[in-house]
């Protein structure tokens, strides 16, 4: 990133009562920033642990804002091939908000992303800023979470089986994910396979979907879930909920998904919506597999 993006400009300095103007400097995010970033996200009510930050910092690039040696802002970008990238974990500490730091974070990310089309999931607080940066809304995504109730084991049809997925399945998982998302997410999927549990749904010996479960935030997250039909997706989610009564789990689904009502009955209640926004070209998903649940809101 160019030095001009990292240095605070005079007009963006923020005066404090009775003191000299202070400035927040931006610098590239580093793996060692994870504990401070976890504290920053906790302050805006997000559940990300140090490990969750380490995972996403390792997969992407981004900036942090520093005041008096402390991290007071963050913003990350994850390139998916040469055509697209997703942005996320855009946070300004509560006492620093409204002073133009969010805008500077976005300028830094836009410079890092180059010509790529960009996706993000916007909170109500972030949407006005992203609209000003050229993003337009596509659809809404709902977080559902809670303590899992008793959930029946998945019911499979003739010729169907669920089997564990592993590193050797990366090519097929990449292919299914590309068909579902329209994105080249190979390195992210490979990293997920190293830390998540995975199941692959086969029909007559052919892989037709997969899902993953991993530790995240207050418990576990189910995602991504890639499947050709709602009933396949349901089996790929039920296999993680079954036998895990009482565990705290989270899933992020498109608003309007018929899976939402079923998940509520499983104990995962609606916990807030965000808006998926795009700047540039929306990725074209060839199908027939579809993305029924996100990896998480940052990674898409
Ligand atoms: C969203 C967030 C990053 C914005 O950071 P910020 O430093 O407060 O934003 P800025 O001061 O740079 O404001 C950027 C622009 O958005 C506008 N804006 C900021 N908050 C706004 C709001 N709530 N409603 C309308 N406009 C708003 C500002 O007026 C400014 O407009 P301008 O470009 O015309 O000058 C910050 O509020 C935040 O961290 N919120 C909590 C975490 C969060 O929700 N992050 C977004 C995740 S997608």
Image (spheres, rainbow, N blue to C red):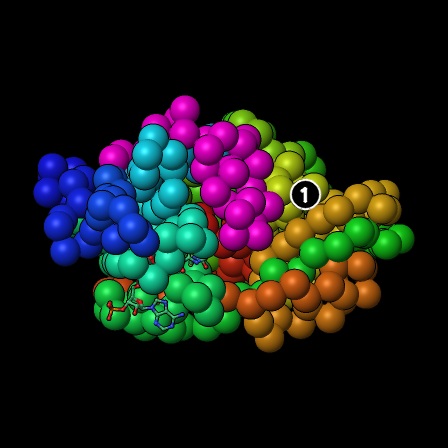
User: For the N terminus, which image quadrant?
Assistant: top left
- Ligand 1: image quarter: bottom left
| Of the pair 247 and 133, the residue shown nearer to us | 133
Residue in view at x 67 percent, y 72 percent = 258
Mark 1 residue element: loop
Q: Residue 296: horizontal and vertical position, in percent?
A: 52, 50
Between 255 and 258, the one lying in front of the other is 255
Where does the image place residue 43, in percent across and percent down from the top left?
53, 47
The residue nearer to you, when weighing 150 against 26, is 26
Give coordinates of residue 61: x percent, y percent: 31, 37
Task: Say which residue appears at 62% left-offset and 42% top-offset.
Answer: 217
Which SS does the magenta portion mostly show?
A: helix
Q: Is residue 119 above or below residue 82?
A: below
- Residue 110 vertical position relative to residue 38 in the rendered view, above or below: below
Q: Is residue 155 left or right of residue 98?
A: right
Residue 186 falls inside the magenta stretch:
no
User: Is residue 200 in view from this perspective?
Assistant: no
- Span shown in magenta: 27-52
């Amino acid at each position: 990133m160019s030095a001009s993006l990292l240095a605070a400009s005079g007009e963006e300095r923020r005066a404090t009562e009775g003191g000299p103007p202070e400035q927040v400097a931006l610098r590239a995010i580093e793996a060692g920033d994870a504990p401070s970033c976890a504290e920053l996200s906790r302050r805006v009510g997000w559940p990300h642990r140090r490990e969750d930050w380490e995972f996403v910092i390792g997969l992407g690039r981004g900036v942090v804002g520093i005041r008096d040696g402390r991290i007071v802002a963050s913003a990350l970008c994850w390139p998916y091939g040469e055509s697209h990238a997703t942005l996320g974990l855009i946070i300004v500490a509560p006492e620093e908000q409204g002073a133009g730091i969010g805008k500077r974070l976005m300028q830094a990310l836009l410079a890092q992303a180059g010509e790529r089309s960009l996706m993000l999931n916007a909170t109500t607080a972030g949407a006005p800023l992203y609209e000003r940066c050229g993003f337009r809304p596509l659809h809404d995504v709902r977080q559902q979470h809670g303590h899992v109730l008793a959930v029946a084991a998945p019911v499979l049809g003739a010729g169907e089986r669920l089997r564990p997925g592993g590193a050797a399945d990366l090519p097929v998982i990449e292919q299914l994910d590309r068909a579902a998302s329209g994105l080249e997410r190979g390195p992210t999927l490979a990293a997920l396979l190293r830390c998540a549990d995975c199941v692959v749904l086969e029909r007559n010996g052919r892989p037709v979907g997969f899902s993953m479960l991993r530790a995240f935030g207050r418990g576990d997250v189910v995602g991504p879930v890639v499947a050709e039909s709602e009933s396949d997706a349901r089996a790929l989610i039920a296999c993680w909920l079954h036998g895990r009564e009482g565990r705290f789990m989270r899933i992020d689904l498109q608003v309007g998904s018929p899976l939402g009502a079923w998940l509520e009955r499983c104990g995962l209640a609606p916990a807030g919506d965000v808006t998926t926004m795009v700047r540039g070209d929306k990725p074209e998903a060839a199908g027939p597999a579809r993305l029924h649940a996100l990896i998480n809101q940052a990674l898409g």
